[in-house]
């Protein structure tokens, strides 16, 4: 008897899948597959449905339980699938009662949730780095985004609980921790003393001296605080890599997206951090084909890759999400969206290759994720020479690359 968890989407879902596995097991669930869904695009929802059907074909006797963001935003869609035994909402997925109740649908109003519960995760199976959830939900309403309706409003864990979790994971042998959430840079706004993300980062590093590396997941540059800049400038254990939620390089499109930064803000943010931490690398999310985007506006996004010095792109072809303002705006033809997404990915591939070219001959600190693969401090993947023990941190010279990964000497 077993519980399999199939995870779609972000790092936060990966982290929460461990807590889901524990909750379902404690409720007596067995011989079941939990599908932890993502709702960020229509394609993500389609893939989750496809996975449900495939699992039922492969394991016809197993129960299939669906949870996650798509289960929260589209519960009736999954409840209507004959393969699905139960749909469990994003707040209910940590409740033993919900897993053991055998209800067809256990999904409440996520917007009514005001606090965040801590999950005592001792690690993530098969990984050398561990995620630490510090925050959930989002108070902002970008016109394209469905996630607040899947996650609710922003709520944070107290610093003491996060430090304790980080200490436990470091004591369990994890060399690198990644702070994650839905809107990590909004951390603390709902707490009594309103601590910012930079304060949290410093407290973790000061109170967990055995932690070798601390990394941030995707952030919103508009909310970066002075302590965070200071930590990047002065704390070598804070890894020199950020994945930015930029979304577009055009001012008008950013306004129509209801983003809180301008093109100039994004460029200035990257330039400031590069002055403070010259070895920092940036990745970014960018949407191709947002409603009303002209060719000129799209080219501004292409140009932003060079102006911000981005090295890794996560390209989203625009996908209208029902219930969001962007879904009601004048839409571009799907062929145009796909073509722009391809050009943006090509630009990202070129930027990555140029970055890898510059890394040849450079000596980097590499965390071995397996016997053959590792990551630099800048989060670049590295193919290791010889058999290396997972979890080891090594000083290695980069001798070449294959277009995607560095090759260590």
Image (cartoon, rainbow, N blue to C red):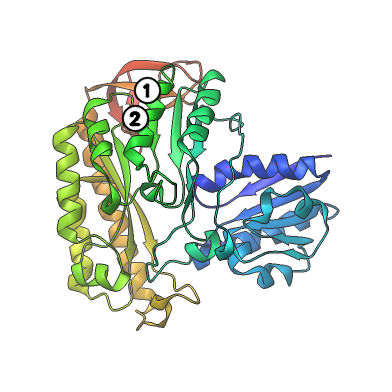
Viewport quadrant of the C terminus: top left
Q: Is residue 401 left or right of residue 161?
A: left
Q: Is residue 163 left or right of residue 301?
A: right
As rendered, which of 331 and 90 lies closer to the eye? 90
Residue 405 seen: no
Tag 1 and tag 2, C-beta contact below 8 Å: yes
Residue 333 seen: yes
Labelled disc at residue 401: none
Secondary structure category for the residue under label 2: helix
| Occupied quadrant, residue 328 | bottom left
Q: Is residue 263 left or right of residue 121?
A: left
As rendered, which of 338 and 13 lies closer to the eye? 13
| Occupied quadrant, residue 282 | top left
Q: Tell me: residue 265, above or below residue 73.
A: above
In space, the residues marked 1 and 2 are separated at their CA atoms by: 6 Å
Q: Is residue 310 left or right of residue 127?
A: left
As rendered, which of 44 and 129 lies closer to the eye? 129
Q: Tell me: residue 404, above or below residue 388.
A: below
Q: Tell me: residue 173, above or below residue 37.
A: above
Q: Which residue is the site of mark 2?
A: 202
* Residue 103 in picture, x, y percent from top left: 81, 62
* Residue 345 in picture, x, y percent from top left: 32, 55
* Residue 279 in picture, x, y percent from top left: 21, 31
| Occupied quadrant, residue 53 | bottom right
The residue drawn where x is 65% and y is 48% is: 6
Q: Which residue is the site of mark 1?
A: 206
Viewport quadrant of the N terminus: top right
Secondary structure category for the residue under label 1: helix
């Amino acid at each position: 008897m077993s519980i399999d968890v199939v995870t779609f989407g972000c790092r936060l879902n990966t982290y929460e899948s461990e807590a889901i596995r524990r909750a379902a097991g404690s409720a007596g669930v067995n011989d079941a597959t939990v599908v932890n869904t993502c709702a960020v695009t229509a394609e993500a929802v389609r893939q989750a449905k496809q996975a449900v059907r495939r699992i039922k074909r492969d394991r016809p006797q197993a129960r299939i339980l669906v949870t996650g963001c798509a289960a929260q935003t589209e519960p009736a869609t999954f409840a209507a699938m004959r393969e699905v035994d139960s749909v469990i909402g994003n707040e209910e997925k940590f409740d033993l009662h919900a897993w053991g109740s055998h209800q067809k649908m256990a999904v409440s109003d996520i917007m009514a949730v005001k606090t965040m519960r801590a999950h005592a995760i001792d690690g993530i199976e098969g990984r050398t780095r561990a995620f630490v959830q510090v925050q959930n939900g989002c108070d902002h309403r970008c016109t394209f985004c469905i996630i607040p309706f899947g996650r609710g409003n922003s709520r944070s864990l107290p610093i003491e609980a996060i430090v304790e979790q980080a200490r436990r994971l470091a004591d369990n042998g994890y060399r690198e921790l990644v702070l994650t959430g839905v809107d990590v840079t909004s951390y603390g706004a709902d707490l009594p003393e309103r601590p910012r993300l930079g304060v949290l980062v410093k407290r973790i590093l000061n109170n967990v001296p055995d932690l070798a590396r601390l990394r941030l997941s995707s952030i919103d540059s508009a909310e970066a605080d002075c302590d965070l800049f200071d930590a990047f400038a002065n704390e070598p254990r804070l890894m020199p890599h950020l994945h930015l939620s930029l979304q577009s390089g055009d001012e008008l499109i950013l306004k129509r997206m209801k983003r809180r930064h301008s093109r100039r803000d994004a460029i200035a943010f990257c330039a400031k951090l590069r002055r403070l931490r010259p070895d920092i690398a940036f990745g970014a999310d960018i949407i191709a084909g947002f409603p009303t985007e002209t060719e000129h506006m799209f080219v501004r996004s292409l140009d932003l890759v060079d102006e911000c010095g981005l090295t890794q792109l996560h390209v989203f072809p625009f996908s209208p999400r029902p219930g969001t303002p962007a879904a009601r705006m004048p839409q571009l033809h799907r062929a145009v969206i796909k073509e722009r997404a391809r050009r943006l990915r090509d630009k990202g591939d070129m930027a990555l290759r140029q970055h890898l070219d510059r890394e040849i001959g450079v000596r980097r600190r590499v965390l071995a994720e397996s016997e053959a693969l590792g990551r630099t401090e800048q989060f670049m993947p590295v193919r290791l020479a010889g058999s290396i023990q997972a979890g080891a941190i090594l000083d290695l010279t980069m001798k070449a690359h294959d277009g995607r990964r560095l090759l260590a000497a």
